[in-house]
Image: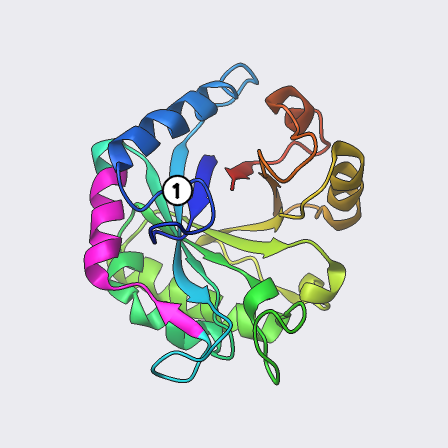
Amino acid sequence: MVAFYGEGYPGGIGLLPANDLDGAADRINRQADAYASYGRPVLPAMELITTNAVRRPGPDGSYSLKLDDASVDRYLAAARKHKMLLVLDFQPGTDEFLPQVQRYEKYLSQPDVAIGLDPEWRTPGSRPYAGTGHSSAAEINAVERYLVGLVRTNKLPQKLFVVHQFTAKMVPDRQQVQVPAELSVVFHMDGVGGPGLKIGGYNALKMRPPFRNGFKVFPVLDKPAMSPSQVMALRPQPEVITYQ
């Protein structure tokens, strides 16, 4: 899978814009095409930051803004129009992951909607931007059990389940994360840096089966950004590549 990642707000972070989603889809497809010669079919995707960690508390006091349904609807419609997967990404701030995920059940009950969790922005006992967040395997497993129920109830295909990480401390007990048959569980290395730093980070964090591995490229912040050939030279080859 090759995805663009972004906030969905005007002027927000990432490559997934708030407007011109058709143009964004064209750019995603071109990026996905760059991975087409490596022996496996490539699925293009949009990864939408659905709950966004912020510096000040929002109306519910959680330091996490929730994207409204109308906005999610626009991205889902665009993803379906262009035959892409939509990944809903969660940055819970001082919330827990599970209640945020449950808020978007009607989308996660769909076969073409996947999920990403971002422990960097899970900040129990603190707040976003005061330090790097973290999550536990128990909290991640609670989300998994909920999603397994949705998959079974709605007779869905296996659902992609991405956990973003760039330090071991973000999920210190990650070996205890479960890998149910209903989910494809990916640990995704999403740190910023030059090729040497990023390759080292990937090698330090890569997981063995039944887990899968992912990798993020920052075209502007990485200096220089790794090319598709460099990304696919990683071992094991990452199966989820996102651009932010």
Q: Is residue 77 magenta?
A: yes
Work out which residue is located at the far top of the displayed protein and give it.
37
Identify the residue shown where x is 75% and y is 33%.
Answer: 195
According to the picture, the residue beneath numbered tag 1 turns out to be: 16
Vertical position of residue 144 compared to residue 200: above or below: below
Asked whether the viewer can see residue 211, the reply is no
* Residue 110: image location, x then y, percent: 26, 53
**Of the pair 139 and 194, the residue shown nearer to us:** 194
Closer to the camera in the image, 11 or 228: 11
Seen as rendered, the residue at the extreme front is: 11
Q: Position of residue 123 (x, y in %)?
A: 59, 75
- Amino acid type assigned to the residue bearing label 1 in the image: Leu
Local SS, label 1: loop
Q: Is residue 103 left or right of residue 215?
A: left
Indicate left or right for 198 with 4 as reference: right
Instruction: Say if 127 sits above or below 13 in the image.
Output: below
Magenta residue check for 222: no
Tell me which segment is drawn in magenta.
64-79
